[in-house]
Amino acid sequence: MSSSSSSKSGKPSSSGHTQTEKPLRTPVNPKRTMEASVFVSPKAKRAKQDGKDKENESAGQLVPLPAKNATCTSMKRSTSASRSSSTSELDMRQIEADLIYEAKKQVATYLNPGIKGIIDVALASSPTAQGAAMQATNSISKLVEVLVRRRDSEPDGYAGKAKQTIQKWLKRNTIFTDQPRLFGLFQQPQLLIPIEDKSKRKNSPQVLVAGEREMYEPAKALIGFISECIRLQTKLKAQPQRLIEPFEKVDTTSADSEYSWRIDIDMRCRSLSDTSLSPPTSGHSAVKEPKQQLSRLDVANTFAYIELKRHAKDTNEAYAQLFRYTKEIYATQHNRRFAWDMIMCNTIVNACVFGPNYAAASENMDLAAAAGRKDFIRFFVNWSFCDSCKLGYDPAISYDDSSQCLVIQSEPTAGNPAMALYSREVLICAEQMFGRHTRCFAVSANKPPPPDPSDKQRKPRQQMKCDAIVKDSWVEAPEDPAEDTRDEARHLSVITERLQNVNSVRGMYPRLRDDCQSGRVHLADPVTGNPYEDTSNTVLGDVVWKQLGETSTALRVFKRIYMNDIGTPIKYARSVQELIIVAADVMRCHWQIIKECRILHRDVSLSNMLVCRDDDGSVHGMLIDFDHAVNIDATEGSRHAERTGTLRFMSVNNLAKSHPRQTALDDWESMLYILCWAGTFGWSSQTRRDNTGRLERPTFLKSWYIGSSLKELAKLKRNILHSEDNFSQVIMEFNYGLQGIMVLIKLVMQLRKVLIETYDDDRRGAMEVAEIWFNPDTNRFEKVLISDPFEERSAMWEELSPLLLQTLEEYAQKNVKFLGCHEK
């Protein structure tokens, strides 16, 4: 599709455990005909639903998970229910424009084109299945070539000699069943219309299809034809586990998307165990989606997208659109480890596999050539025969239809057998295209009963008591676990042991569960049953990974952490006062961990601050996510060899990748940015800036995440922090309509003063001091750095950190009294 096309712009656009390929989701909840069904808010009902979402949010609730057979069930990311009804159309257009710009930058940064062996990433593990897949590929390829030759000889229809030729070919190739149906598919008028056999070309240097819209139906028909051919091959030694089928409508908008993107072709997994298909396969190997249920397009049920363009020059634009769409897949499908997509530019097709820090695109497959058509067919055959984990789904996460909840299966160890944990809420979902793809599930070891539809006062989530958290993430780590000094499970083990008697931070950090093995996730080889680690290398295979390694793509390891204690995301802080209390608890815990455990967090951000509500009504904060944490003593002489944390909250030293080592002051600087961000943009739908027209899109903080290079962003933050006058420009963009905002303003002003101005006058500020010197060796004038306040300040972190904590705690104590809460 073309994002600039006038025809597209501005349009609003199923007992037991069902396993593996079913996209698991947490939908928002508009009214439906079935009381126990799970739902999503279509854009047409968004404004009406907003009031209910706000009511749920104010009570600290999260929305339920889907029920079985809820027709067209779909889901929304749990961290951003419905957009506020006050969000203007102008705001949405600006947000979408920002996402488009972000996607284009990501294409330039992460895309690795022309990677050999992508087609084998989805190769079945069993040699028998591999042989059957190759046999199916050859048979379908030969059939398509017969089709192409007959089409070229009789373009007006398949009649006469062409009909006889195809019937004879089918008779000889008895691998296909239901030959009358297959022959009927040959006669679809739109099938393969834009495809030209290269052998028929004379002087034309390029095959040109009609227009982009004219490509939709032929491409959809070709995919449907391949899928039907796979289904009809029943004499293979191994049978496919699923079919990959196109959605019935093309060029349409996802019903559960927050944006107005129009999807060219959406592809779904359809289980061969469904009764409407033949032959059935044993077990539940895939999502059950009979065609009669494919009545609308939604992200929740999508396997992959295909983006079409008429010209090869639009390749990068097609990739950018896929990046935007796939970002929503990660945010919506909570069992998705990695994703697949395709682009078709003219007759050139590229398949792309997306991981946490890479996007690997295949070599060109030219549908105008027999070899390209065969490779295209092979992709769909491999997807149909491979194990579900090679489609990107997590085999450890399933959906229990009877209790209407997620089931997360822990790994068996020598000391702990495998156990099931149950969840109806997702605390944190993967909302970014690239990164660690962190997800947090509120879980219980007790299987809940089915939700009681007669209980009108409590939602399904409230009818289930959770006492633990499961966290999934893809983290950068060495291949050898013994060399993994940043292992979160190891850090939490040390923290739990050393802080168990420190009452001042009790309940402010997660503790590891003793009955589950936290750490690196292992998958079982389908053939041998032997476990292997789930890493970027094992996902892609050695051939592909070696090519990506040449582009300095770091190894990512999939880890799962099982933790006791539980909180809710920061968006459930109900006021500025609660936000400040949570921030103070987080930094108190941060400081105690440094003092007692010598562990530095290095990623203080909004998403790593949880709100915990006690039985007496009081609130306290929890610091989570130690993926980036390091031992201070082990890194005493280390410098900023890498950037860690959330971009918008990164410290100046971190952004500039400068030589001062990271200290607690970097995390304190991040906390200052967090409070400024919350005061400007809010931290929930209730605190989001309203559409008053005074300042719809704050400009200063917007540059923290878009439009600037990292070094430029570091300079910008230096300038903002340099003086009180400069910092006041950020304060001016705070949301002054937010109740309690003046308390937050005074706090951030004081924190900046302690962080920046705790020096004599000649060293006050944040800007580097440099002089221009003449270098006789180069015969040029050069800039020479004389002093850097941040470098000088980093040496005083043990002196400044208690002062910063004292400031924050003073404000927190005042707000505890203001709220009438009891001190913990």
Image: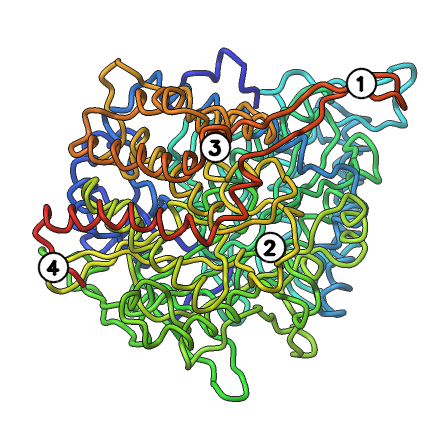
Q: Residues within 10 Å of mark 2 (few under 14, many from 20)?
A: many
212 relative to 55, above or below: above
- Alpha-carbon span between mark 1 and mark 2: 60 Å
Mark 2 secondary-structure assignment: helix
Q: Residues within 10 Å of mark 4 (few under 14, many from 20)?
A: few
Q: Tell me the residue that label 2 is attached to.
A: 391
Q: Is residue 795 left or right of residue 548?
A: left
Q: Which residue is mark 3?
A: 249
Helix, strand or loop at disc 1? Answer: strand
Which comes before the other along the chain, label 3 or label 4? 3
Label pair 4/2, CB-CB below 8 angstroms:
no
- Left or right? Give the position of 30 relative to 561: left
Q: Earlier in the sequence, mark 1 or mark 2?
A: 2
List x then y, in percent, for residue 693. 26, 13
Q: Quadrant of residue 504?
A: bottom left
| Upstream in sequence: badge 1 or badge 4 | 1
Question: Could one spot residue 217 in this view of the protein?
Answer: no
What SS does tag 3 mark?
Answer: loop
Which of pointers 3 and 1 lies earlier in the amino acid sequence? Answer: 3
431 versus 415 height, above or below: above
Q: Say which residue label 4 marks.
A: 822
Residue under the image location 30 percent in, 57 percent down:
67
- Residue at point 32% right, 54% down? 610
The residue singled out by tag 1 in the image is 774
Q: Earlier in the sequence, mark 4 or mark 2?
A: 2
User: Which mark is in front, 1 or 4?
Assistant: 1
On the rendered structure, is 31 left or right of 78? left
Q: For residue 15, which numbered disc appears in the image?
A: none
Q: Amino acid at mark 4?
A: His
Q: CA distance from mark 1 to mark 4?
A: 64 Å
